[in-house]
Image (spheres, helix red, strand yellow):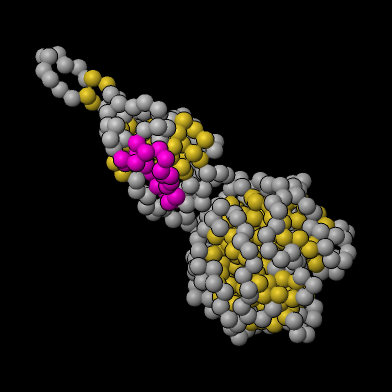
């Protein structure tokens, strides 16, 4: 039987008491696809990358206990499978399939006898109460005037744009940007005289770092968004210096700003889509150009997996922008529609990733602009092209309502990028 016999100085009958903390806990989280566990132990099971089959001991005594915990709340994506290894599990033989597939679940099992075998004391999912603070500030950066630039403009928590900050890193246009790590940002990829894959990290006070040699296929006219509360991904784009070679590949970004190798793309290859986070931990790519302007979207799970095309809602267009607002929703806005000329219409995205029909636009119709979240639950569209470069902005409140033009601050430019950053106002 599991446990430790406590001191019994008077020789009285007693009970077997559990050891301190009840169990011996495995020192590191299990990431393998298979593991054999032992009685009297607790295990953290990390299924971020794969399903895990857990083999129980082939022999057990009454009272043997094993605890399994969803280390990163990913059992809903990659489940665990219990192999009872010849013993019964809740009265069923090991021929039965036993699976657990709920995020945040913990499984506490105790061996009873040969009839019932292993019996769960509990298999509940723990409540996920902590809420990450929202970003308060934003940054617009890079772009094209009469040539490529690397300047940036910070946006305060009240949506006020600051004057130009001298750029850091290679001047370029057609990059993408997003928040990562909760309170930082990253600019990535773009075009100089050819497509590039370099990145520039932005710390939580808005300081842009030097170029980091890129990972993944060099490209321009892509999009980026955060997912999973503290990670991000770049996706789609055009890989050649001139002409059209569209891709749908993605590159994940860790919560420390490290860009991963190419992931084979899902959905229609295209350039100049836009992307934003929604639903607190997921993302959406939408619209773009794939030989013609489209309105399709692709949802991204909280583990960074891109889903197949969803037939678009609203006017097909390219060169638009998107941002999160209202803590769990998103907005697509502006762009170049199939008909000639720019537009200022918007499309709201619900917290379940459903794109709404067109909302009549507010502000100057334009394309090749950027957008970001700011102020905890609001968004801002800025800069762009309307027959020439502009530096105007349009604020979006926490209900998704776009305000009139605000005269811009800083150098007018277009084909730039923007992202939220900082937990501090």
Q: Nearer the viewer, residue 93 or 382?
A: 93
Q: Is residue 320 left or right of residue 7?
A: right
Query: Which quadrant does the N terminus fall into?
Result: top left
The answer to whether residue 361 is above or below residue 200 is below
Residue 299 on the magenta span: no
Rendering coords of residue 339 (x, y %):
75, 85
The answer to whether residue 286 is above or below residue 181 is below
Query: Which residue is painted at 75% across and 66% down in the image?
Result: 270
Total marks shown come to 0
The answer to whether residue 366 is above or below residue 80 is below
Rendering coords of residue 400 (x, y %):
53, 76
Q: Is residue 251 left or right of residue 97?
A: right
What range of the chain is rendered magenta? 88-107
Query: Which residue is painted at 37% across and 42% down in the image?
Result: 107
Rendering coords of residue 188 (x, y %):
72, 55
Residue 95 on the magenta span: yes
Rendering coords of residue 381 (x, y %):
64, 72
Q: State the predominant SS element of the stretch in magenta.
A: loop
Residue 417: tell me if it is visible: no
Q: Nearer the viewer, residue 125 or 383?
A: 125
Query: Which residue is painted at 75% across and 71% down in the image?
Result: 289
Q: Is residue 340 left or right of residue 259?
A: right
Query: Which residue is painted at 87% across and 66% down in the image?
Result: 243
Residue 301: tell me if it is visible: yes
């Amino acid at each position: 039987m599991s446990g430790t016999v406590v001191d019994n100085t008077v020789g009285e009958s007693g009970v077997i008491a559990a050891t301190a903390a009840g169990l011996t806990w495995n020192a590191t989280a299990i990431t393998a696809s298979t593991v054999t566990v032992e009685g009297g132990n607790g295990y953290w099971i990390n299924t971020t990358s794969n399903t895990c089959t857990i083999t129980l001991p082939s022999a057990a005594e009454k009272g043997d206990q094993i605890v399994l915990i969803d280390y990163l709340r990913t059992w809903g994506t990659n489940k665990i499978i219990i192999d009872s290894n010849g013993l019964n599990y809740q009265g069923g033989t090991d021929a039965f399939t036993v699976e657990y597939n709920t995020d945040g679940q913990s499984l506490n099992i105790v061996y009873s006898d040969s009839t019932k075998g292993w019996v769960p004391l509990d298999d509940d999912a723990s409540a996920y109460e902590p809420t990450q603070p929202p970003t308060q500030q934003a940054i617009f950066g890079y772009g094209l005037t009469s040539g490529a630039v690397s300047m940036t403009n910070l946006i305060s928590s009240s949506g006020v744009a600051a004057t130009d900050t001298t750029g850091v890193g290679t001047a370029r246009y057609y990059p993408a940007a997003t928040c990562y790590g909760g309170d930082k940002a990253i600019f990535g990829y773009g075009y100089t005289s050819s497509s590039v894959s370099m990145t520039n990290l932005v710390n939580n006070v808005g300081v842009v770092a030097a170029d980091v040699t890129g990972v993944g296929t060099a490209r321009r006219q892509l999009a980026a968004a955060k997912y999973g509360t503290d990670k991000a991904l770049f996706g789609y784009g055009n890989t050649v210096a001139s002409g059209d070679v569209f891709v749908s590949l993605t590159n994940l970004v860790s919560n420390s700003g490290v860009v991963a190798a190419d992931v084979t793309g899902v959905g229609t290859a295209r350039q100049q889509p836009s992307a934003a986070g929604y639903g607190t931990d997921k993302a959406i790519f939408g619209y773009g150009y794939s030989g013609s302007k489209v309105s399709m979207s692709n949802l991204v799970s909280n583990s960074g997996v891109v889903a197949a095309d969803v037939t678009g809602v609203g006017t097909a267009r390219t060169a638009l922008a998107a941002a999160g607002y209202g803590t769990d929703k998103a907005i697509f806005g502006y762009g170049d529609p199939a008909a000639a000329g720019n537009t200022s219409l918007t499309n709201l995205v619900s917290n379940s990733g459903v794109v709404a029909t067109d909302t009549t636009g507010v502000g100057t119709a334009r394309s090749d602009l950027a957008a970001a979240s700011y102020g905890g639950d609001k968004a801002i569209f800025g800069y762009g092209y309307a027959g020439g470069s502009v530096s105007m902005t349009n604020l979006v409140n926490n209900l998704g309502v776009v305000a009139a033009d605000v005269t811009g601050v800083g150098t007018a430019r277009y084909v730039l990028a923007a992202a939220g950053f900082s937990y501090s106002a």
